[in-house]
Image: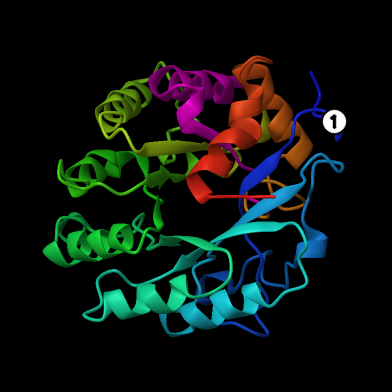
Amino acid sequence: MPVTPTATELIDAHVHVWDPNRVRYDWLAGTALNRPRLPGDIDDADGAVSRWVFVEADAAPAAALDEARWVAGLDWPGLAAMVVAADLEAPDADERIGRAAGLPLVRGVRHLLQSLPPERLAAPALAKGLAEVARAGLVFDACVRWTQLDALDRLLSDTFDGTVVLDHLGKPPVDAGLRSDAGQAWLAALRRLARHERLVVKLSGLPDEASDAATLRQNGPDLLRAALDVFGAERCMVAGDWPVSTGADGRTTAREWFDLVRDVVGVRDWPRVAAGTARAVYGIRD
């Protein structure tokens, strides 16, 4: 059933905006994405999306707070919450988190984990910084690859009491598919992570992990369904990951992605996945 603007509320729980002329992004150099991406450019699924959660876009470390302040000052009526960057390994991580938390609509923090070696994921400094995020009452967005899911499980010790959002289903092996050895390893790790009762999952990012649109359509639904089976709709939220996964430079449009997810979720659970979980996790109010 297609997503329509008059149906259930739809919050895109993961979107990026940036302007390389205002904030430094080293990773954009030489890519097709290396140009301003502003709120007015966002693929809103033909008007179906009403609100957005901004997620930091890996600005140069020294520019993390500049990025957060720049986004907070944008003319963006649909901005519902912000997940901003903070270096959790820094000696002054608590101060960095505090400065970020003072900005309007900041509900979470992200320290990119997907490229960290195992020894850094296991280092006490990172666990200490993560505890500071929880102490500040903020959500932690965890962006890891599927091979790092067990390392994330260990990082979230049994004493950790904060809320964690697993971005992009933990970046599963979309090309290999759920029935492959890699797919089964991803699923087993996801089940282990589910013991952390305050961990929720973003149904997002699969287009960027797929080699082409046909593979996404073939293998994506099985992976989405597996995550839903593990966590339940009350611990899942949908997101477009624009402009990386959806839009002109992604594998699919936002409308096509949201339709695919809705087909998997089903009409009964769609309101929760489309907006309810995001509202609860990120404290989104009207």
Q: In the image, what residue occupies the spot 41% across and 24% down? A: 231
Give coordinates of residue 205: x percent, y percent.
Answer: 55, 42
- On the rendered structure, is 25 left or right of 71? left
Specify the segment rendered in magenta.
215-242
The local crowd at label 1, few if under 14, some if 14 to 19, many if 20 or more residues have their Cα within 10 Å, is some
Give coordinates of residue 122: x percent, y percent.
Answer: 15, 55
Can I make out residue 253 in this image? no
Q: In the image, what residue occupies the spot 58% across and 74% down? A: 29
> Is residue 114 depicted above or below 69 in this figure?
above
Observer-nearest residue: 273 or 174? 273
Give coordinates of residue 220: x percent, y percent.
Answer: 56, 26
Observer-nearest residue: 132 or 118? 132
Find the residue positioned furthest to the front: 286
> Is residue 133 depicted above or below 233 in this figure?
below
Q: What amino acid does circle 1 point to?
A: Thr
Magenta span contains residue 268: no
Give coordinates of residue 49: x percent, y percent.
Answer: 77, 43
Q: In the image, what residue occupies the spot 45% across and 31% down? A: 235
Q: Which residue is mark 1?
A: 4
Name the chief secondary structure element in magenta: helix
Judging from the image, what secondary structure is the residue with disc 1 in? loop
Magenta span contains residue 226: yes
- On the rendered structure, is 175 left or right of 184? right
Residue 119 figure quarter: bottom left
Residue 71 figure quarter: bottom right
